[in-house]
Every structure is written in structure tokens, then in C-alpha cells.
Image (cartoon, coloured by chain):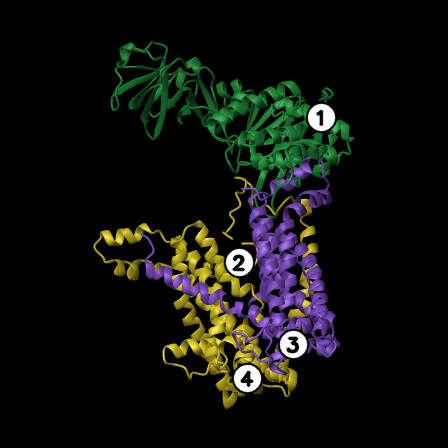
Chain colours: A green, B purple, C yellow
């Protein structure tokens, strides 16, 4: 495996758009700069345009407008087989009529690599994915996890500058998914390739990625590191899609502060209208009486709707009325309010722990 | 709920009705009599000898093989290309194209014979083996399309994408991925096309001439025009040539189908 | 061949298979087959259609004589009657057979499917020759009938012989659609019916039978249409005195070169075929078409 040159795996998408026929834009003005060697995840619900974007990068789908550059070179007009990207598919897409070794040798054969070299590289990459000795098997003789590892091996054996992964773990069960996540992470560290990973699973995205681009309705809502996105989601959609939130759709008050259905809260930053207030569950505390709430805290009355003890913590589901629900995650030994389903509590939090998010990123 | 005994008996009787009657052609073909009496009163190889030595029968067999092979080649090439082409069409266009390609199946053969006879009469193609093969190609095309399409539909479309992403040109993907995976369908399509032609009598009857007589036509004439017991040997040969390849294809197809097609 | 539901990528719009840039290859690959079919099938069909209105003279004369000429009318009536008899006989035989298939184990079922396809796989001429031998005067079938006191019944040369042979070869088209519908019926419904107090027979009549009807309709319409066009069987097992429509078309085409008259009969046959298939499709949904495809594809790989 050769290390790509410092900039060789950099992908720049500029104002990328896709529409089918005269339909709506499936991908709408996507601009993204993926650094060489970065692990970037395209995250979003189905129909959000993330797979179409990946297909445009791979060359399976024509670009309606906009540009795709690899290492500074325009690759939009190139057919898939000239882009030199490795790709891993959802259902593995191993050739059923070839053995494991033949599958892995396929891209090398297409590149007219000498026979001895092919044998050496196949053995090397089989070892990399821990499948040594499986070369003579046929794909249907392997487990799902093994098949996906063969697919990974086949996609990196020709030292591509970029590896594209299209929901590679979604066909596997949960346990296998976790062990393959680690495998993918390890491959990324060892190979130092650019990884572009598509998923609709936020946990997967959070634990694997250097950066995440959250897709919604054909657009990128926000790009950032997992921690950044969690702490500062920026938009209502991201707040809801990544992690859990207590979300209040009130309005900022002129001159500072925030108001939601009669509750008046302190807010450090003054925001324009059209912003929701978000508090993450682990930032929330619960009190039985107003007297227990610290003076500077923001507060809101709530009804307990569910109570789940989970060992390391306890989860309390809350109903704030006005169609707003949420949850609090408390230490297992939390004291304060007496908690029982149906009981009333006061939820409170430090104003420094709340964030404002915009409802519609387009305005 | 288990099957009632009478139901089993009925099913067995129907099974016998379906399979046993045809078997009489085997003993018949070894009969020594010049009539069609069954069971035969004596045994001989006379009719096989006639089948393989008398010119009217040997020429018919050769003609049928020739027509069958031409048909198989034409129908397989056209049908395979069409089946692959169909998978690359949009939903609506695909439905229309498939409907059109399969239409010869629901049209009665006699009607196909009628229209082709009138057309070939004008084109001067009647009475030629090549003309018969062309007509048979139209008849056999649907079988190839069905066989290959069934195979392609079971194929994960990501396989072709994977080929592209691994650096294979579209032609290379076709040659190394699509075609090998479609091969069982192509082969069974070819066998079906050959058999369809080899056994076809109505169109061949219409287009026949003294120099273009296929085996089924010779057989047909040997019971309608003159009484020639050679037909019993020819019938046994037909059972062998028509049924055995399909049965074999069944077995091989079932075995290869188990691997090859992705879940 | 079950309907194949492609697990499309969740957000893929109806993507024209493997990638936009190769779409152009589709029509190109289709072209030869379409041209061949058009040349050797569609154009000749249109020309015959034209003939039926213009040969020997322009007008509806050919169609008028279809329904006024006594001989032609008798042939049409006989053909429809034979097709109907074959259909009814087919339903009677196929229903218990298909039902039995749903009860049989994996292996037995595979054997039963193979058996039902045997006549279909057997050379048409060999099969009909075999029936000629069996049904001739003094033949095996007459002997068997003699055992029950029907010794002098003549079979060969009658429409009965024709119908028997046609029923045999058309049975797969009846059995397979029926079976595919019956297989979908939840057998617990029968138990439910019985637990509600209905007798076994009553449950069958009121629950199972109505649910299996789409399969019966699909099979029956298919068999009826296919029976209309038989030529070899009536020519070998029937007699010129009891001709069916296909034989008359053959005589008019080959001996009289009356393309107009033969064409009118052919067009009539085609119209009946399409009408019956359309009606059955409407009655039973596209499942009937699927059944038909199933039956036909049964000839090849599974």
C-alpha cells in the first residue's frame, strides 16, 4: 500500500446539483472540501441526497451542474472505471462466479498488473482484513461479515486514492456491525486514504468520522466534527437527527432572553427570530419544588411520562405540554425530585448549556 | 390437514395420464409389423434402419438439424442482446418492449404460419430452409428472452457498478461479469430455441417444398399422406432429442442456480 | 419465477439501471430483435389484416361470410366447443392435482411439477402419434373401454380424441397458475372455518374454493385461448369432417391461396384470444399474466 501524496486524495465538490428529468433537485448546491486522508461521513435520512452525491463522486450518476475535483483535477467527465476510486457496496457486490482471490485480483487484472505482483498484493490485502487462507472460497461460502471484508479488500487492493463506502454495514446485524466499524476505522488509520462514508445511522457516523456532513432534502445542513455537531447543531434538523434533544419552539425576546409559552428564559446570545432553543438531555436536571432550583437556572414545568433505570444512568422521559416532549439523562444516584410516571417536576438547566438553532437554514 | 387417500389416487392417475401414453412410441419403434398395431406382435430394427438410411428420412433429419442450429444461433444472439438491452430501459419502456418481444407466445402458431406464409410467398422465401429458420427465430425469440431476463433480474445491479469502480471498462464488465452470470440463461435459451425449431411443424408445413422438408413435416406426412411406420422410430428419436436436453437443462439449471445467483 | 422485488437503494429514484451514461446502449441492443420481430411477424400480420379487408374485393365480405356461411359457422362453433370442453376437463383434472401439490412435500412437489410438464416437453408429433396408436380401432383404449362394456366406441377421427390429447398437453397451463394461487392461501383459514363450526366440506366450499378462483380463471382463460389454435392434434386425431378452425385456415391458405378468407378467420381468432386474456386479466388482476409467464417459463429453467 502506498501512501497517497499529501493532496492526492482531496475531493472538492462545488455547487453540485442533480435532477432527474424535469423533477426537483435531488442534490441541491452541495459544496464540500474533503481533505486528503480524512474520514468524512455523509449522514442523512433516506431520500436526503447522500447516496446520489456518492454516486456522482463515483461516476455512476451524471452531474447536472457543479464540479467534482480530485487532487485539484476535474474528474466530472470521467467514467467510473477511470476515476480510480475504491468502492464498497451495501450488499457487498462480490462477483458470485469468482473465488475470493479472483474477486480481489479483478481490479489488478483490469490494470494489467503482472501475475506475481497480483499474487503478492492479494495475499497482503487478505492478511490486512484477516482472511488469510480464504482465497479459494466462493462468496456464498462466506458469512456476511467475511463477505464485507472481502469487499473492503477488493476495494483497496489497487491503492486507490479514495475509498467510497455506501452503507456498507446496513446489511449486517448489530454485533457484527460494531466489530466491522472497528475494522473500518483500523483500515483508515493504516491505509491513510480518504474515506467517504454514507450512512443513515447517526451512531455509526459519530463513532467513525473525522467530520460529518448532515444531509437534508438534497442540501448539506451542516458540516463539522461529531463533537462540534452535537454541541452546536446549528439547525433544528441537525439537533433532532444527531442525538436527543429537548427542543422548544418559542422565540427570542427583543433585548435578550428567550420566551416559550409564557416561560421566560435567560439567553446569552441574542438571536434573530426563527430560532428554537435546544438542551441536551444530559444537561437537564430535575427538581420537585421551585425552591430546589438554583437561582440563575432556566426552568420549565414537566410531567414524567417514563422512567428507565439503565445502570450507568437513568433516563426520564418528559412532557412539557404544547406538543413538546423530551428527556433527561441523570446520574443513577441523582436526588432531588421524587420521580414517578405521571408526576410533575421542574426541569432546569444552566443557560450556558442551551443552544439556539435555526428552524429553516435557507432563510 | 393431510391429503385424503382418494386425492392421492386421483393425482397419481392424472400423473399417469400425463406421462404413460407417449411411452408407447418406444415399443412401437421396435415393432416388425407394417401396421400400427399395439402391442407389437414381433420385434425388429427395420424402422430405425429406414430412419437412418432411406434418403427421405435422413435428409429430413439433416434439414431439421440445420434449421434448428440456425434458429438457435439467431434467436440466442438476438434474444440475449434484447434481454440485456431491456434491463437498461426505464420502467415504462421496459414493459412495452418485453410485451412486444413475448407476443409470439400468445399468438396461435397457425396464425403465425398464415402470416409468414403470405409474406414469404411475396418475398420468395417459401420452400427454403433458411426461410423456415427465420420464421422459427421469431417463434423462439421469446423463450431466449424469458430465460436470459430471469437470470439478469436475479442479478444485483451493484455488481456492474462494482466492476466499473474496480477499473473495468463497460465492455470488460459485460464480458467478465454480466455475460458469465447470464450464461446459464443464455444456454438454456439456446437449447429451448433449438428444441422449439426442431419440433415445430405448422410453420414448417406451410413453408415446405420437396427440397425443404423438416423431420416433423416428414413425420406428419407419413401418417396423413402415406402410412409409414418409420414414424415410430422417428418419434422415439424426437423424444430423445426434444425431452432429454430440456430434462438435463432442468437438472443442471437447478444445480447451477443454487450458486451463482446472489440471494 | 416469483416476482422479483429489487431491493432498491433507499433513496435511489427510479434509476435507469447501471448508470446514466450507459442508457444509450439499451435501445441499441434491443434493435436487432425488434427489427427481426417487426419484419417477420408484425408487418406480415398487418399485411394479412389488410388482405382480410381487401382480398378478393374491398369490404367486410370475408367477415360477413365468417358468420353467414354454414360450413364456416359450424367450424367456428365446433372449435369454440372443443376449446370449452378442453377447458372444463382441464379444470376438473387440474384442480385436485394442483391442490395435491400444495399438500405435498418438497420432493413430491418437484416430481409433480416435472410430471405435469412432461407432455409439454415431449415432441408434439411423437405425443400425437402415440395417441393415434392407443386410440385406433382395436387399440388399447378401446380395449380398456371394452372392460366396462363400451367396446364399440370409435375414438380416432373424432373430436373426443382431439380433446383428450389437447387436455393432456394443456394441463401445465392450468395447473401452474392454480398452484401459484393456492399456495398463497393461508391454510389456517380452513382451521378457523372449522373451529367456527363449519364442516370440512363447507369450509372448503365457502373459504378455500372462492380464494382459489383467480387461479382457476387464469388457467382456464389461458387454456381456452391456446386450445383455439391447435392444428396438428385435430389434423392427426380428428377428421376432415370435423375440422377445427386451424385446419380450415391451413386449407384456405395453402390450397386455395385465399389470404383474405384465411386472414379474416385468423383475425377473428386473434380478437377472441386478446379479448379473453384481457377479460381474465381484469377479472383476476395481473396475477393471471404472471401465472401465464410462470407456466410458459416453466418450460425452461424451473
| Dot label at residue C288 | none
**Camera-side residue: B261 or B22?**
B22
Callout 4–callout 1 Cβ contact below 8 Å: no
Same chain? Circles 2 and 3: no
Residue C228 location, x and y as percent?
51, 75
Q: CA distance from mark 2 to mark 3?
A: 27 Å
Residue carrying label 4? C63
| Dot label at residue A121 | 1
Structural crowding at the residue carrying mark 2, measured as other residues with C-alpha within 10 Å and reported as few (<14), some (14–19) or many (≥20): many
Q: Relative to A217, is B97 above or below?
A: below
Q: Relative to A286, is A172 above or below?
A: below
**Camera-side residue: C278 or B182?**
B182
Residue carrying label 2? C298
Q: CA distance from mark 2 to mark 1?
A: 46 Å
Give the label, 4 or 1, closer to the camera. 1
Label 2: which secondary element:
loop
Residue carrying label 3? B205
Task: State the residue at coordinates (71%, 45%).
Answer: B175
Amino acid at each position: 500500500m502506498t501512501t497517497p501524496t499529501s493532496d492526492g486524495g482531496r475531493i472538492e465538490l462545488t455547487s453540485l446539483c442533480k435532477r432527474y428529468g424535469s423533477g426537483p433537485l435531488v442534490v441541491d448546491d452541495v459544496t464540500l472540501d474533503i481533505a486528503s486522508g480524512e474520514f468524512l461521513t455523509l449522514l442523512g435520512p433516506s431520500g436526503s441526497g447522500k447516496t446520489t452525491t456518492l454516486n456522482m463522486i463515483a461516476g455512476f450518476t451524471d452531474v447536472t451542474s457543479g464540479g467534482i475535483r480530485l487532487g485539484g483535477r476535474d474528474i466530472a467527465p470521467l467514467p467510473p472505471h477511470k476515476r480510480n476510486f475504491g468502492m464498497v457496496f451495501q450488499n457487498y457486490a462480490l462477483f458470485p462466479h469468482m473465488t475470493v482471490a479472483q474477486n480481489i485480483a479483478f481490479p489488478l487484472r483490469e490494470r494489467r498488473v503482472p501475475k506475481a505482483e497480483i499474487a503478492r498484493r492479494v495475499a497482503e490485502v487478505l492478511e490486512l482484513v484477516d482472511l488469510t487462507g480464504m482465497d479459494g472460497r466462493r462468496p456464498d461460502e462466506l458469512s456476511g461479515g467475511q463477505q464485507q471484508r472481502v469487499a473492503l479488500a477488493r476495494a483497496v487492493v489497487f491503492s486507490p486514492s479514495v475509498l467510497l463506502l455506501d452503507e456498507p454495514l446496513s446489511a449486517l446485524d448489530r454485533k457484527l456491525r460494531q466489530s466491522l466499524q472497528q475494522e473500518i476505522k483500523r483500515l483508515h488509520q493504516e491505509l491513510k486514504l480518504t474515506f467517504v462514508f454514507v450512512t443513515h445511522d447517526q451512531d455509526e457516523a459519530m463513532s467513525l468520522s473525522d467530520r460529518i456532513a448532515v444531509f437534508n432534502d438534497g442540501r448539506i445542513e451542516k458540516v463539522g466534527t461529531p463533537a462540534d455537531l452535537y454541541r452546536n447543531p446549528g439547525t433544528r434538523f441537525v439537533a433532532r437527527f444527531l442525538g436527543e434533544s429537548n427542543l422548544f419552539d418559542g422565540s427570542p425576546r427583543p433585548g435578550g432572553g428567550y420566551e416559550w409559552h409564557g416561560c421566560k428564559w435567560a439567553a446569552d446570545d441574542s438571536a434573530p427570530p426563527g430560532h428554537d432553543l435546544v438542551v441536551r438531555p444530559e444537561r437537564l436536571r430535575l427538581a420537585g419544588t421551585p425552591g430546589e432550583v438554583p437561582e440563575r437556572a432556566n426552568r420549565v414545568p414537566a410531567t414524567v411520562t417514563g422512567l428507565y433505570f439503565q445502570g450507568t444512568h437513568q433516563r426520564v422521559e418528559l412532557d412539557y405540554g404544547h406538543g413538546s416532549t423530551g428527556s433527561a439523562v441523570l446520574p443513577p444516584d441523582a436526588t432531588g425530585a421524587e420521580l414517578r410516571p405521571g408526576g410533575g417536576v421542574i426541569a432546569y438547566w444552566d443557560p450556558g448549556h442551551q443552544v439556539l438553532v435555526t428552524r429553516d437554514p435557507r432563510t | 390437514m393431510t391429503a385424503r387417500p382418494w386425492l392421492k389416487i386421483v393425482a397419481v392417475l392424472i400423473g399417469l395420464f400425463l406421462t404413460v401414453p407417449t411411452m408407447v412410441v418406444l415399443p412401437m419403434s421396435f415393432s416388425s409389423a407394417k401396421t400400427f398395431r399395439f402391442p407389437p406382435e414381433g420385434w425388429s430394427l427395420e424402422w430405425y434402419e429406414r430412419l437412418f438410411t432411406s434418403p427421405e428420412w435422413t435428409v429430413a433429419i439433416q434439414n431439421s438439424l440445420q434449421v434448428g442450429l440456425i434458429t438457435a444461433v439467431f434467436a440466442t444472439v438476438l434474444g440475449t442482446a434484447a434481454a440485456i438491452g431491456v434491463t437498461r430501459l426505464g420502467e415504462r419502456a421496459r414493459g412495452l418492449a418485453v410485451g412486444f418481444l413475448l407476443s409470439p407466445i400468445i399468438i396461435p402458431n397457425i396464425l403465425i404460419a398464415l402470416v409468414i406464409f403470405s409474406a414469404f410467398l411475396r418475398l420468395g422465401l417459401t420452400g427454403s430452409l433458411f426461410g423456415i429458420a427465420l420464421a422459427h427465430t421469431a417463434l423462439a425469440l421469446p423463450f431466449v428472452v424469458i430465460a436470459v431476463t430471469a437470470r439478469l433480474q436475479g442479478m444485483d445491479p451493484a455488481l456492474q457498478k462494482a466492476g466499473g469502480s474496480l477499473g473495468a471498462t463497460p465492455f470488460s464488465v459485460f464480458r467478465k461479469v454480466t455475460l458469465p452470470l447470464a450464461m446459464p440463461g443464455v444456454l438454456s435459451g439456446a437449447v429451448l430455441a433449438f428444441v422449439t425449431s426442431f419440433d415445430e411443424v405448422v410453420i414448417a408445413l406451410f413453408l415446405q417444398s420437396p427440397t425443404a422438408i423438416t423431420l416433423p413435416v416428414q413425420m406428419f406426412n407419413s401418417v396423413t399422406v402415406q402410412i409409414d411406420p418409420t414414424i415410430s422410430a422417428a418419434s422415439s428419436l424426437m423424444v430423445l432429442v426434444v425431452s432429454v436436453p430440456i430434462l438435463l437443462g432442468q437438472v443442471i439449471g437447478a444445480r447451477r442456480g443454487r450458486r451463482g445467483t446472489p440471494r | 419465477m416469483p416476482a422479483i422485488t429489487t431491493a432498491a437503494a433507499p433513496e435511489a429514484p427510479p434509476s435507469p439501471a447501471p448508470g446514466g451514461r450507459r442508457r444509450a446502449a439499451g435501445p441499441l441492443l434491443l434493435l436487432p430483435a425488434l427489427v427481426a420481430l417487426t419484419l417477420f411477424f408484425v408487418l406480415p400480420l398487418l399485411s394479412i389484416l389488410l388482405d382480410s379487408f381487401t382480398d378478393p374485393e374491398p369490404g367486410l365480405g370475408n367477415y360477413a361470410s365468417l358468420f353467414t356461411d354454414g360450413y364456416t359457422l359450424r367450424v367456428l362453433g365446433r372449435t369454440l366447443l372443443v376449446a370449452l370442453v378442453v377447458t372444463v376437463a382441464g379444470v376438473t383434472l387440474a384442480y385436485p392435482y394442483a391442490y395435491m401439490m400444495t399438500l405435498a412435500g418438497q420432493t413430491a412437489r418437484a416430481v409433480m411439477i416435472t410430471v405435469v410438464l412432461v407432455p409439454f416437453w415431449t415432441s408434439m408429433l411423437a405425443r400425437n402419434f402415440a395417441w393415434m396408436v392407443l386410440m385406433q380401432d382395436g387399440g388399447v383404449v378401446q380395449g380398456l373401454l371394452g372392460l366396462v362394456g363400451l367396446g364399440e366406441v370409435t375414438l380416432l377421427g373424432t373430436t373426443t380424441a382431439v380433446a383428450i390429447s389437447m387436455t393432456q398437453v394443456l394441463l401445465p397451463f392450468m395447473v401452474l397458475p392454480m398452484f401459484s394461487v393456492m399456495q398463497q392461501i393461508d391454510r389456517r383459514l380452513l382451521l378457523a372455518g372449522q373451529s367456527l363450526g363449519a364442516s370440512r366440506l363447507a369450509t372448503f366450499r365457502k373459504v378455500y374454493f372462492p380464494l382459489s378462483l383467480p387461479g382457476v380463471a387464469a388457467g382456464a382463460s389461458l387454456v381456452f385461448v391456446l386450445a383455439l389454435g391447435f392444428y396438428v392434434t385435430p389434423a392427426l386425431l380428428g377428421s376432415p369432417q370435423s375440422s377445427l378452425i386451424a385446419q380450415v385456415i391451413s386449407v384456405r391458405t395453402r390450397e386455395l391461396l385465399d389470404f383474405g378468407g384465411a386472414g379474416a378467420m385468423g383475425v377473428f381468432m386473434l380478437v377472441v384470444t386478446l379479448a379473453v386474456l384481457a377479460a381474465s386479466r381484469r377479472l383476476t388482476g395481473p396475477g393471471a399474466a404472471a401465472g401465464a409467464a410462470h407456466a410458459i417459463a416453466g418450460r425452461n429453467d424451473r
